[in-house]
Image: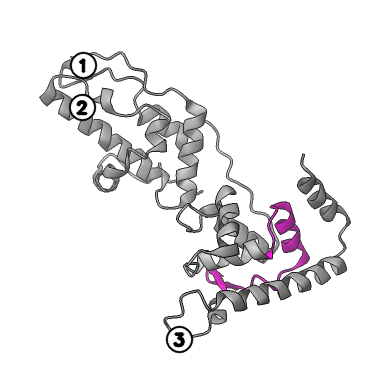
């Protein structure tokens, strides 16, 4: 445990509500000073003061982030966040972050490292979650999956191939390449993709299905296993090889007559 973690643990144990209140007032003043600096660089094309946009609407609830209770402040401490980082997260949520320069660029890198922002400065699912936790002063537990209902496990078992050997239309295609090499690293890349919020678990599943079906059909024409040329996992997820098949996968899911409900929809 580093010295920074020890400091935050001590704060969590020793800070009284009065001390937190005074600290919040101090950091709020720092925020106001930062806000005045950022006004000149952020997008103000609508002619309105940026301060008019400094509220967060999550699930139709206005959340003024700098009027939080001590419980919300403690969540900030636990997550090793301060009001500067919270302010940048709010700007990202409002799509009002660019340009990213100076101190804001440094703070963005911290948020990217913590998976609260994507590399192109978009707020992630994890980032939205921490904003909501701070606003309401309540921790939101992460979903717990069993092996039976884990969307990654389902994708690993049913969508991504184990080898490049397969049979289609009565023809056997030989292969010698093991495809699913590193499950735990693949799991990490998989959930990183989901956290960014652009693709759902359904998107990855059905896009992979379409990509493998396409490769098998091409094999009938070429006479060799085209699965051989699909990247092994975890590289398959790292480079997001499935993305050209996202729309085909979405259409296939909608048109699949065997699906009576949405068994592959998971709440992250």
Q: Residues within 10 Å of mark 1 (few under 14, many from 20)?
A: some
Q: Position of residue 193 (x, y in %)?
A: 45, 44
Q: Which residue is mark 3?
A: 47
Q: How is the image coloured?
A: one colour
Residue 145 relative to residue 228: left or right:
right
Q: Nearer the viewer, residue 247 or 242?
A: 242
Could you say whether the residue bearing mark 2 is in a helix, strand or loop?
A: helix
Q: Viewer-nearest of labels 1 and 3? A: 3
Q: Is residue 139 visible?
A: yes
Q: Position of residue 31 (x, y in %)?
A: 67, 72
Is 252 drawn above or below residue 219 in the view shown? below
In percent of the image, x 32 and y 39: which residue is there? Answer: 242
Q: Which residue is mark 2?
A: 216
Could you say whether the residue bearing mark 1 is in a helix, strand or loop?
A: strand
Q: Nearer the viewer, residue 173 or 66?
A: 66
Is 101 drawn above or below residue 233 in the view shown? below
Q: Which residues are magenta?
A: 55-83
Disc 2 and disc 1 in contact, CB within 8 angstroms: yes
Q: Earlier in the sequence, mark 2 or mark 1?
A: 1
Distance CA(mark 2)–CA(mark 1): 9 Å
Residue 43 relative to residue 203: left or right:
right
Q: Which residue is mark 1?
A: 173
Could you say whether the residue bearing mark 3 is in a helix, strand or loop?
A: loop
- In the image, residue 49 lies in the stretch drawn in magenta: no
The N terminus sits in image quarter = top right
Q: Position of residue 21 (x, y in %)?
A: 81, 70
Q: Earlier in the sequence, mark 3 or mark 2?
A: 3
Disc 3 and disc 2 in contact, CB within 8 angstroms: no
Q: Earlier in the sequence, mark 1 or mark 3?
A: 3
In percent of the image, x 68 and y 65: which residue is there? Answer: 83
- Residue sitting farthest toward the bottom: 47
Distance CA(mark 3)–CA(mark 2): 56 Å
């Amino acid at each position: 445990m580093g010295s920074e973690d020890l400091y935050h643990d001590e704060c969590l144990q020793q800070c009284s509500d009065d001390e937190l209140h005074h600290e919040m007032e101090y950091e709020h003043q720092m925020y106001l000073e930062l806000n005045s600096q950022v006004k000149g660089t952020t997008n103000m094309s609508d002619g309105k003061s940026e301060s008019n946009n400094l509220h967060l609407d999550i699930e139709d609830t206005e959340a003024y982030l700098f009027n939080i209770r001590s419980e919300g402040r403690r969540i900030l401490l636990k997550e090793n966040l301060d009001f500067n980082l919270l302010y940048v997260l709010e700007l990202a949520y409002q799509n009002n972050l660019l340009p990213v320069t100076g101190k804001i660029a440094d703070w963005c890198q911290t948020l990217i490292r913590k998976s609260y922002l994507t590399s192109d400065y978009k707020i992630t699912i994890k980032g939205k979650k921490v904003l909501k936790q701070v606003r309401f002063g309540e921790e939101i537990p992460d979903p717990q999956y069993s092996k039976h209902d884990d969307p990654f496990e389902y994708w690993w078992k049913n969508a991504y191939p184990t080898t490049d050997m397969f049979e289609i239309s009565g023809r056997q295609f030989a292969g010698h390449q093991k495809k699913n090499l590193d499950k735990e690293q693949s799991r990490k890349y998989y959930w990183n993709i989901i956290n960014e919020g652009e693709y759902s678990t359904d998107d990855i599943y059905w896009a992979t299905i379409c990509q493998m079906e396409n490769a098998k059909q091409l094999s009938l024409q070429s006479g060799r296993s085209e699965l051989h040329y699909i990247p092994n996992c975890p590289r398959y997820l790292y480079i997001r090889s499935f993305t050209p098949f996202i729309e085909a996968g979405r259409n296939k899911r909608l048109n699949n007559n065997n699906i009576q409900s949405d068994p592959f929809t998971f709440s992250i």
